[in-house]
Amino acid sequence: MTNIRGLLFTLASPLKAFYANVAVKQIDVTGMSSSVGILPTHVPTIAVLKPGVVKVHELDGNVSKFFASSGTLSMNIDGSCQVLAEELCSLNELNEQAIKNLIDVSQKKAADLNATDVQKAEAGISIEVAEAALRAITEK
């Protein structure tokens, strides 16, 4: 049974809940296989999120944008939806120069001939997340 007031939405990370069972019009996320808009009548689904923007379309027309490093989306049969992210912040909290510095450092670590496979993999993940964060703030 869906909620006629909107999609009951929770957006949280281990450190902070930005929305906790709040009625919203729609959310947009980027999953591993595609980008998707979730409305109150969306079919139940579970998805793994890629690093990227979570857009929240509020009932009053405002749109809030967040950056999620990774996470999961769960759309439930009752019209509620949860996005749980490993790392999550408002786009306004991202610093372009700090992200560029992280990309440079991570690229050097990935190219280091003395780095272990684990260190190179960690650097690759850092690059993927940082590049997604950079795209997020340049496409505001």
Image: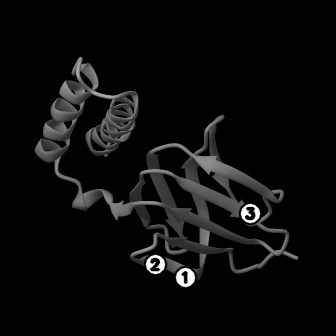
Q: Element type at marker 1?
A: strand
Look at mark 2 in the image and give the residue it sits on: 17
Count how many numbered circles sit on residues in the image: 3
Q: Which residue is drawn at 48% across and 56% down?
A: 55
Look at mark 3 in the image and give the residue it sits on: 75
Q: Which residue is drawn at 33% across and 39% down?
A: 126
Residue 61, percent from left and from top: 49, 67
Q: Residue at x 83, y 57 (%)?
A: 43
The front one of 86 and 46 is 86
Q: Residue 20 carries which label?
A: 1
Among the 4 quarters of the image, the one containing residue 139? top left
The front one of 105 and 40 is 105
Residue 36, percent from left and from top: 64, 45
Which of marks 1 and 3 precedes in the sequence?
1
Circles 2 and 3: CB atoms closer than 8 Å: no
Distance between mark 2 and mark 3 Cα atoms? 17 Å
Q: Check disc 3 and give the amino acid type.
A: Met
Q: Residue at x 45, y 44 (%)?
A: 51
Left or right side of 106 for 13: right
Q: Is residue 45 above or below residue 36?
A: below
Circles 3 and 1: CB atoms closer than 8 Å: no
Q: Is residue 41 above or below residue 116?
A: below
Distance between mark 3 and mark 1 Cα atoms? 14 Å
